[in-house]
């Protein structure tokens, strides 16, 4: 049986990058008229239950999507069968994901920017310790990835 595509975006804290990736993916899916399962989480538990960083909320709002209702959660074993694609924001989190990946995992795990032509193998830098302007760069990165994912879905590749 072919599983319906379901996308999970993963960073460290689930308050800066992955909520922006979830928002960008929701926006791209909405624009394309696609109903998809989309979620985000962190490999660490530091911010479980917390809303996204205010700078992520502001950046998403500036780009037309409200992510203020999201709440941080940590990656769980069940995610590896619930989602067909699990995308890590950087190499450290890719390693963290691989370290807890159960043998029963059916998800494809990769770096998020692997879906963007010319950006394969690149990380999305952590903007947590930077100023709000860096969150705009994060938004551009996650939007280019979300658009590439939608293009693959429309193409029938996924
Ligand atoms: P994120 O950013 O992984 O993009 O959500 C971070 C948020 C919090 C921390 C690190 C990175 N922290 O150390 O609390």
Image (spheres, grey):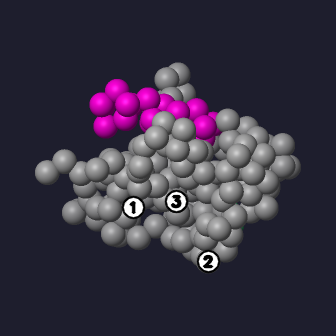
How many marks the image carries: the answer is 3
Give whichever of discs 1 and 3 has the lower sequence position.
Answer: 3
Is residue 88 among what the camera can see? yes
Which marked residue is nearer to the observer: mark 1 or mark 3?
Answer: 3
For the residue carrying disc 2, how many other residues have a C-alpha within 10 Å: few (<14), some (14-19), or many (20+)? Answer: some
According to the picture, the residue beneath numbered tag 3 turns out to be: 40
As helix, strand or loop, the secondary structure at mark 3 comes to: strand
Q: Which mark is residue 119?
A: none
For image coordinates 68% across by 42% down, the residue present is: 139
Look at the image and say whether residue 71 sits in the magenta stretch. Answer: no
Q: Which mark is residue 49?
A: 2
Determine the residue located farthest toward the left in the rendered image.
Answer: 1
Q: Position of residue 134 (x, y in %)?
A: 79, 43
Cβ atoms at labels 1 and 2 below 8 Å apart:
no
Give whichever of discs 1 and 2 has the lower sequence position.
Answer: 2
Which marked residue is nearer to the observer: mark 1 or mark 2?
Answer: 2
Cβ atoms at labels 2 and 3 below 8 Å apart:
no
Q: Which mark is residue 99?
A: 1
Q: Position of residue 50 (x, y in %)?
A: 67, 74
Cβ atoms at labels 1 and 3 below 8 Å apart:
no
Give whichever of discs 2 and 3 has the lower sequence position.
Answer: 3
For image coordinates 35% across by 57% down, the residue present is: 83
The span shown in magenta is 141-158
For image coordinates 31% across by 37% down, the residue present is: 158
Look at the image and say whether residue 146 sits in the magenta stretch. Answer: yes
């Amino acid at each position: 049986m072919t599983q319906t595509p379901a996308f999970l975006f993963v960073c460290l804290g689930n308050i800066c990058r992955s909520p922006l990736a979830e928002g960008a993916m929701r926006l791209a899916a909405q624009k394309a008229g696609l109903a998809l399962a989309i979620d985000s989480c962190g490999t660490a538990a530091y911010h479980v239950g917390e809303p996204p960083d205010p700078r992520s909320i502001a950046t998403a709002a500036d780009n037309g999507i409200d992510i203020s209702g999201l709440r941080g959660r940590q990656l769980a074993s069940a995610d590896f069968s619930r989602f067909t694609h699990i995308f890590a924001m950087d190499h450290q989190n890719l390693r963290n994901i691989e370290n807890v990946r159960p043998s029963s995992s059916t998800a494809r795990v990769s770096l998020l920017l692997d879906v963007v032509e010319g950006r394969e193998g690149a990380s999305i830098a952590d903007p947590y310790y930077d100023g709000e302007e860096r969150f705009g760069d994060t938004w551009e990165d996650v939007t280019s990835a979300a658009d590439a994912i939608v293009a693959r879905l429309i193409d029938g590749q996924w």
